[in-house]
């Protein structure tokens, strides 16, 4: 049942991405971000990304836009495509300036080894995760992975800067024997993703099915599909086999062609061999030419097989082979100062010259090392203009963001790219000047100068000194930590001394220059007081006489006994 639900989740993702046939896409599906992330763990674990038979289907066959025009992880790409189809899009994703990925402290399985010959099928996974960045842990996806098999996956919510606990994972009865990696994908509240392999599990199973299911035959009818004569639907006849003994479970059957979205359906299977037919419908202006007829086949042991089973020739003189394009994209306000407002309006103008008409667009902000901030809009006609609003969190990283779009037309072509850039600022950086001394000083004094955020172009020469004879400084500065200068200063002359940072001598990563700092003011008194004695008495004196003691400045501690 678990794998059946996973199969449905895969199909739901495909429907949400617009990769499925019209019949499938007409259904209404709802997927949470966690479900999308779990799917990523199931089919795209870190040690299987390059060889997963599901990879090309999951990612689609994309054109020159790149990996379907989206940055970030497969989870983020799936989430963005999900937004485009969902009636209730996921909230915009942003995160604080926490640059630290959460980490695995420990990850272990019990029992280990898991002896399935003695009836054991369930393991308890003990985890200990940590987040040093300060935003706190959010959730984790914990899974077993073994090359050539489906990942066995669960998820758990987390909180705080460290989290410990246990989860359980159950293996299918004929799971392959051998060593599995015990892995985790960990997310913090800033959107950073960490994790990796935390341990291994040894599985003993003499009943293991180690053989992948295979395609015996696949064919399409009619072939060629002549869309000029009104044909749009093709029947795919399949024959699949599983020699491993666990039996066939399900298959995903689809048409693929470079530069277009895959056209997808699925079917449940039983027994060690299965044959039947499924139908796929192409959009009216589907690309002409040769399509691959492909399948991904799952057995009950979690093995995955399949590949290309044949080809289909499509004739369509009305084919739209042209990708939709960005005419213009403009972000406003730009720069965006999130200290005073976090919403940015993106004005867009898109065009489709292929004739099938625009379908939808995913519009998003991207910045290296961060999750994309995404929204979506439905489109129609051969040109479309309008505006969308994206709101950043008040803790969103500052710097330059790309304003991007992924545009779909009704023929399944995908276009887009970068349409503008947006500078995000968080007010202006500030400097604070402090000292352990206050009031009046009689000698050298210490000073600390610290910026409110990381800045560039700042050193001790930018600090203004008034009535200072000499100074010795130690300054540190980086792109990830505030600038700090500590110094020992010697005043020049009696009177007021001042230390401050002028406006505009440094800038943050977003290009915002600093405000003028506070002015540290002290009174320096470095001269010894002088004293004068005088009397109104005349000489000679024969007894007591008046005496006046006059100091050049205010003094303390003077008594008659000091004479």
Image (cartoon, rainbow, N blue to C red):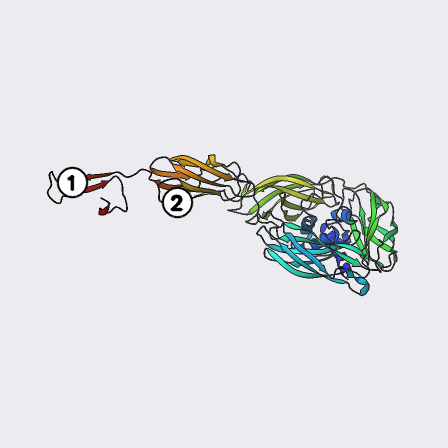
Q: Can residue 286 be seen in this view?
A: yes
Q: Do the residues labelled 1 and 2 touch (CB within 8 Å)?
A: no
Quadrant assignment for the C terminus: top left
At label 1, counting other C-alpha atoms closer than 10 Å, the crowd grade (few under 14, some 14-19, many 20 or more) is few
Residue at (75% x, 45% y) in the render: 412
Q: Is residue 32 visible?
A: no
| Coordinates of residue 238 in the picture (x, y in percent) | 87, 53
Cα gap from disc 1 to disc 2, whole angstroms: 40 Å
| Coordinates of residue 300 in the picture (x, y in percent) | 82, 59
Residue at (58% x, 52% y) in the render: 135
Q: Label 1's element?
A: loop
| Coordinates of residue 24 in the picture (x, y in percent) | 76, 54
In the picture of the structure, the residue carrying the numbered disc 1 is: 535
Residue 437 shows which numbered tag? 2
Residue at (38% x, 41% y) in the render: 521
Nearest-to-viewer mark from 1 and 2 = 1
Residue 247 vs residue 375, the one in the foreground: 247
Quadrant assignment for the N terminus: bottom right
At label 2, counting other C-alpha atoms closer than 10 Å, the crowd grade (few under 14, some 14-19, many 20 or more) is few
């Amino acid at each position: 049942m678990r794998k059946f639900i996973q199969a449905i989740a895969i199909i739901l993702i495909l429907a949400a991405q617009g990769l499925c046939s019209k019949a499938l896409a007409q259904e209404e599906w709802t997927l949470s971000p966690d479900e999308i992330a779990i799917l990523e763990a199931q089919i795209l674990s870190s040690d299987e990304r390059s060889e997963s038979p599901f990879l090309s289907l999951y990612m689609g066959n994309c054109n020159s836009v790149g990996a379907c025009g989206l940055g970030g992880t497969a989870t983020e790409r799936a989430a963005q495509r999900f937004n485009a189809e969902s009636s209730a899009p996921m909230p915009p994703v942003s995160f604080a300036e926490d640059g630290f990925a959460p980490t695995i402290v420990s990850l272990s399985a019990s029992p280990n080894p898991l002896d399935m010959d003695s009836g054991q099928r369930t393991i308890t996974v003990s985890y200990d995760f940590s987040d040093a960045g300060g935003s706190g842990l959010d959730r984790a996806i914990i899974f077993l992975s073994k090359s050539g098999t489906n990942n066995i996956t669960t998820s758990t919510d987390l909180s705080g800067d460290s989290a410990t606990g246990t989860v359980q994972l159950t293996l299918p009865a004929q799971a392959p024997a051998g060593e599995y990696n015990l892995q985790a994908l960990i997310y913090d509240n800033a959107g950073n993703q960490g994790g990796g392999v935390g341990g291994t599990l040894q599985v003993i199973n003499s009943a293991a099915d180690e053989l992948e299911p295979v395609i015996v035959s696949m064919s399409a009818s009619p072939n060629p599909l002549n869309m000029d004569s009104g044909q749009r639907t093709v029947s795919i006849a399949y024959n699949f086999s599983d020699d491993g003994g666990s039996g066939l479970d399900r298959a995903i059957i689809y048409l693929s062609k470079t530069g277009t979205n895959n056209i997808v359906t699925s079917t449940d299977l039983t027994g060690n061999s299965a044959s039947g037919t499924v139908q796929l419908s192409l959009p009216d202006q589907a690309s002409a030419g040769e399509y691959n007829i492909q399948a991904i086949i799952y057995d009950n042991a979690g093995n995955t097989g399949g590949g290309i089973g044949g080809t289909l020739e499509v004739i369509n003189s009305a084919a739209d082979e042209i990708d939709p394009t960005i005419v213009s994209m403009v972000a406003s306000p730009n720069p965006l100062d999130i200290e005073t407002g976090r919403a940015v309006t993106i004005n867009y103008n898109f065009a489709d010259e292929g004739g099938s008409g625009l379908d939808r667009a995913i519009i998003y902000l991207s910045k290296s090392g961060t999750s994309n901030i995404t929204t979506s809009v439905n489109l129609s006609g051969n040109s479309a203009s309008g505006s969308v609003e994206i709101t950043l969190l008040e803790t969103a990283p500052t710097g330059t963001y790309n304003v991007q779009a992924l545009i779909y037309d009704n023929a399944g072509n995908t276009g887009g790219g970068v349409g503008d850039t947006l500078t995000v600022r968080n007010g202006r950086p500030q400097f604070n000047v402090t000292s352990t001394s206050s009031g009046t000083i009689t000698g050298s004094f210490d000073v600390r100068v610290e910026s409110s955020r990381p800045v560039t172009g700042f050193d001790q020469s930018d600090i203004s000194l008034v009535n200072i004879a000499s100074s010795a400084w130690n300054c540190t500065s980086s792109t990830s930590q505030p600038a700090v200068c500590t110094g020992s200063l010697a005043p020049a002359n009696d009177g007021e001394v001042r230390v401050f940072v002028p406006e505009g001598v440094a800038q943050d990563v977003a290009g915002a220059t600093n405000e003028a700092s506070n002015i540290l003011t002290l009174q320096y008194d470095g001269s010894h007081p002088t004293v004068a004695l005088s009397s109104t008495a005349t000489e000679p004196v024969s007894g007591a006489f008046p005496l006046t003691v006059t100091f050049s400045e205010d003094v303390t501690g003077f008594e008659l006994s000091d004479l």
